[in-house]
Amino acid sequence: MSSKNRLSPGDTIGILGGGQLGRMLAQSAASLGLKAHIFCPDPDSPAFDVSAGFTVAPYDDISALDRFAAAVSVVTYEFENVPGPTAAHLDAKVPVRPGVRALQVAQDRLSEKQFLTEAGVTIAGFAKVDSQEDLETALTAFDGKGVLKTRRFGYDGKGQLMIRGREDAAGAFEKIGAVPAVLEDLISFECEVSVIVARDLDGTCASYDIARNHHENHILKTSTVPAGVSGETTASARAMAERIVTGLDYVGVMGVEMFLVRDGAGERLLVNEIAPRVHNSGHWTQDACLTSQFDQHIRAVAGWPLGSAERHSDAVMENLIGFEADGWRAVLEDPAARLHLYGKSQTRAGRKMGHVNRISQKTV
Amino acid sequence: MSSKNRLSPGDTIGILGGGQLGRMLAQSAASLGLKAHIFCPDPDSPAFDVSAGFTVAPYDDISALDRFAAAVSVVTYEFENVPGPTAAHLDAKVPVRPGVRALQVAQDRLSEKQFLTEAGVTIAGFAKVDSQEDLETALTAFDGKGVLKTRRFGYDGKGQLMIRGREDAAGAFEKIGAVPAVLEDLISFECEVSVIVARDLDGTCASYDIARNHHENHILKTSTVPAGVSGETTASARAMAERIVTGLDYVGVMGVEMFLVRDGAGERLLVNEIAPRVHNSGHWTQDACLTSQFDQHIRAVAGWPLGSAERHSDAVMENLIGFEADGWRAVLEDPAARLHLYGKSQTRAGRKMGHVNRISQKTV
């Protein structure tokens, strides 16, 4: 490294996780003249194919972690469920970015909601649920409705249960595994939007235009930019996202998911959850911005200044899930489309195999 | 392969040459879900870091070539001086694209000029020179002026000599090594422009907007798009480029360099030379088009349809040569710039270390 905590071209970034996000981070690192070293227990990780080095080992293999730490100048990660002891062990040897604190907060829905409240952003009402009794009490406060979510390890709709009345509530705590949970107030929202925000080592923030997200079977299907919301809403979304990363002393890219609520009082946003990493709803930046979210994350964790988050085109990102990826040839025939495939050797239902960015001339 | 000569995601493209062009081709292959296998004699090749597989061996190592051919579905190359026997040996086992014929033509300036003439594109006058006597004869026909170039292995100004009069002509054939050469008529041109053209397996062509190129010390320094020429000139450039790739039954991307001549008769173009590969003057397409020249080449050699060659932004590409790459931090501070570094371990004067694309809103 040229100076403390800042990398120079030729240095190596360590990445925990070898899925598609690690792969696209490694590709950006290479484009910027950096080397990537992937650490992943899966010997068939798609990120290995595009990285200068890799380690196949469990996340609790201390000697493998030590060798990894010695081989890299900084460590980042593609997923928020990096085990706490893994992050702490590495952080004692080499900078871990976005940061151990961001992982702690994002790994526990309750800590996350408490942090978001303290950071002064608006979120839906919530209550801590450690028993069926807690649940019943909380439901009373929320008009008998809500979404019960485990505090840890939920994603793509897993570990959650919708409660719309008495019959859903019965035995619900048992159904989600009788583990620490939270009940979220059931919000009537028009759609989910998200902001991809970045913060560098000097505290400068940059956020991309907000995207309107559409899910199918609890998995993100499309992200559309522009999102069709007012300038005030966009500004508010960006301001909240920047308050969050600043509050965490965060270094890197974060995805912030929000509910867009439209009612008599107008348009407003409630932060739903944060992902302390590059985010699926930011893949559109690869083809509609000069600096993609992957480039941006690499720049930040390298201790480099952020690039422009300006958008030069409108974009719709569509995920290719499971056997949808078999339609790759039709995507290639579409002149407005750019195909991105992750090089996964096995196609499985529900597995993210690739995505398509369709761009058009910028309208707003 | 899913069908004869056409690849499917997961298949492997073999690339001869591991420099920056091979590296950027490998990166595009990965983004499209293909694997890259680089063949290069240099154990320190920058392309290895981003490729699923590589072979370090001389280009005449038959058993290494056989193993390489067995490991890939198609072979392409990053440089036009692939030895003829290497290409022929591989071509007997696996498709070599853009093609053996394109290599033969491009490796010999005389064959190239003869082919271009037959293809019906306009070029500067030329004469075959195998001796000082031939040179004197040719100079008489060209008003005593011309550029003497070796027929083989010239690039970035190497293997050429400018002759402006008697004193330059004396001993000139000896000076360029007394090897087969051509004399080109010395053209008074305003600038060099280039067209990046692609042709797919079905014969469909697509060409990018033409770029205006500026050289320093015989090495490309910048490429600017739009080039500031008339619509007729652009159309003529594209038509000539498409005639060339069609004449060669070419599959892949080609760089076609042309002289822009402006005189009393208006604006016209003379084809200077062709490069049967992705080309430095096409690097701007990475950030100003949805389909970069690297994606386009991979699509073509994979037997896939071409992508759109439309441009969404204006662009200036600047090469970072030798120690200019030390200025990477200043590039990162420029919000209009995207930095591309090649991961070369040694910086040397005259070596291409990276490039910068600066984009702005599309004007024409």
Image (cartoon, coloured by chain):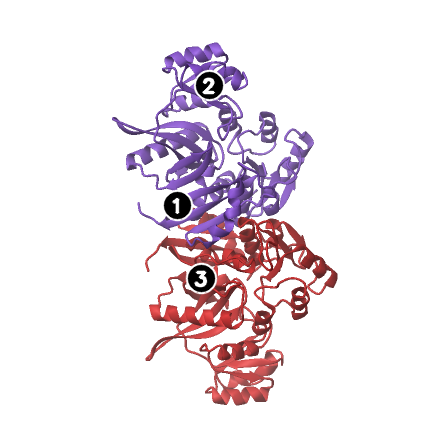
Chain colours: A red, B purple
Q: Residues at badges 1 and 3 in contact (C-beta under 8 Å)?
A: no
- Which of the labelled discs sits on residue B342, or is there none? none
Distance in Å between CA atoms under marks 1 and 2 = 35 Å
Distance in Å between CA atoms under marks 1 and 3 = 29 Å
- Which of the labelled discs sits on residue B315, or is there none? 1
The x, y position of residue A61, in whole percent, is 72, 63
Q: Is residue B47 left or right of residue A288?
A: right
Task: Give the letter of the chain under mark 2.
Answer: B
Distance in Å between CA atoms under marks 2 and 3 = 58 Å
- At label 1, the amino acid type is Ala
Indicate whether A239 appears above or below B176.
Answer: below
Indicate whether A157 appears above or below B153.
Answer: below
Residue projecting furthest to the left? B264
Q: Residues at badges 2 and 3 in contact (C-beta under 8 Å)?
A: no
Q: Quadrant of residue B258?
A: top left
The x, y position of residue B149, in whole percent, is 48, 21
Q: Quadrant of residue A232?
A: bottom left
Label 1 secondary element: strand
